Amino acid sequence: MLRKFSRPRLLGLLIGIVGMTLFAAACSSDAPTEVVKIYDSNWASVNLNSYIAGYIIENGYDYPVEYVTGVTGTMLVALPTGEMHVVMELWRNNILDWYNKEIAAGTIVDLAGTVDNVSNGSKGQILENSAQGFYVPTYVIEANPGLVSVTDLPDYVELFRDPEDPSKGVIYNCIIGWACQKIVRAKWFAYGLYDTFNVTEPGSAGALDANLVGAYTAGDPVLSYYWEPTTIVAELDLTRLEEPEWTLECQAALDLAVESVPYESTVGCAFSVSDVHTGVYSGLVERAPEVTEFLANMFVGSLALGDLEAWKNDNDVQWRDAAVFYLKNNQDIWATWITDANATEIIAEVNAALALE
């Protein structure tokens, strides 16, 4: 016996079929649906670079973007496995063993290649050739001309006295979670400062900045890890203390020391002078080559990022707000990063999104 469908039921069936057809068409379209996961950590330049890149990826290339918050240890695990796709600032020389292993395995791609110190602004380079180390205000050096190197520090304990432990001096380290935090502690031991200086880690990048700027403003002595080029080093008159010359042997000793607490190295030397590249999960290159090409072209620069951080702080806004401010005011720069055949369309879509902000 044949079953007759009532008109309402037949209409519902037709609507369902049409809906399924439209859904299937949408799924088979060229519109990107897979999320791009970007590393979001706890220092200003990487936050700004990440949100500037993310805004263009989301609004120009139509990929959903997720920001994965973490520290260096998080990134070391997540990037090679594809749980994270983009690290805007890959400080390779602070994690050299991991970097060499993952590059050799093909799990990650350095968008600038594996050569150190490429020309500033080169493809894949996100921060210029830079230095790291132990900085003091230049007025401290002028008042104490015998203070030239880290090896001189035991003679200046009283100058850098630790308020929490007046029997020793204090070195302000980079924060826990950064690779440099372990390296500084390894050097502290190698330089024989264990008995004369304490090492203190501020709770955040902002606290590290505030401690250095606060002491400088007050005209007080302060000994702190920092890096350059940055706005703080550009605006404050700071001097980096000399350290023994970097060598591969020294780097190997430091790499071994930071594998486990208490991070004690038998040898210490200066951080190698290097630039910072953008790194990506290799699978992203395969599924979104247009995105990785854009990322390779992106370059804001350290001092411009410093100015943008100052604007953010002055206006008490979020990182995304600072990214929007940059993009609204610098189309002449960011438009050059987009080199696709449909670049005009991508730029227009980003501008349309910015107009709604």
Image (spheres, rainbow, N blue to C red):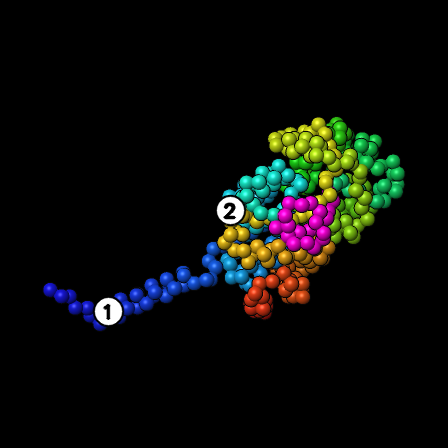
Does the magenta-highlighted stretch encompass residue 126? yes
User: In the figure, is residue 167 to the left or right of 339?
Assistant: right
Secondary structure beneath dot 2 equals loop
Q: Compared to 36, does 251 lie above or below?
A: above
Query: Mark 1 is on which residue type?
Result: Leu
Main SS class of the magenta portion in the image: loop
Q: Which residues are magenta?
A: 111-132
The crowding category of the residue bearing disc 1, from other C-alpha atoms within 10 Å (few below 14, some 14 to 19, many at least 20), is few
Q: CA distance from mark 1 to mark 2?
A: 46 Å
Count up the numbered dots.
2
Residue 316 at x, y percent in the picture: 65, 58
Secondary structure beneath dot 1 equals helix
Is the C-beta separation of discs 1 and 2 under 8 Å? no
Q: Which residue is mark 1?
A: 10
Residue 253 at x, y percent in the picture: 68, 30
Q: Is residue 218 visible?
A: no
Query: Mark 2 is on which residue type?
Result: Gly
Residue 128 at x, y percent in the picture: 71, 51
Q: Is residue 106 visible?
A: yes
- Residue at 63% of width from left, 48% of height from top? 113
Q: Which residue is mark 2?
A: 82
The crowding category of the residue bearing disc 2, from other C-alpha atoms within 10 Å (few below 14, some 14 to 19, many at least 20), is some
User: In the figure, is residue 84 to the left or right of 151?
Assistant: left
- Residue at 80% of width from left, 39% of height from top? 241
Which quadrant would the C terminus be assigned to in this image?
bottom right
Q: Compared to 188, does 133 lie above or below?
A: below
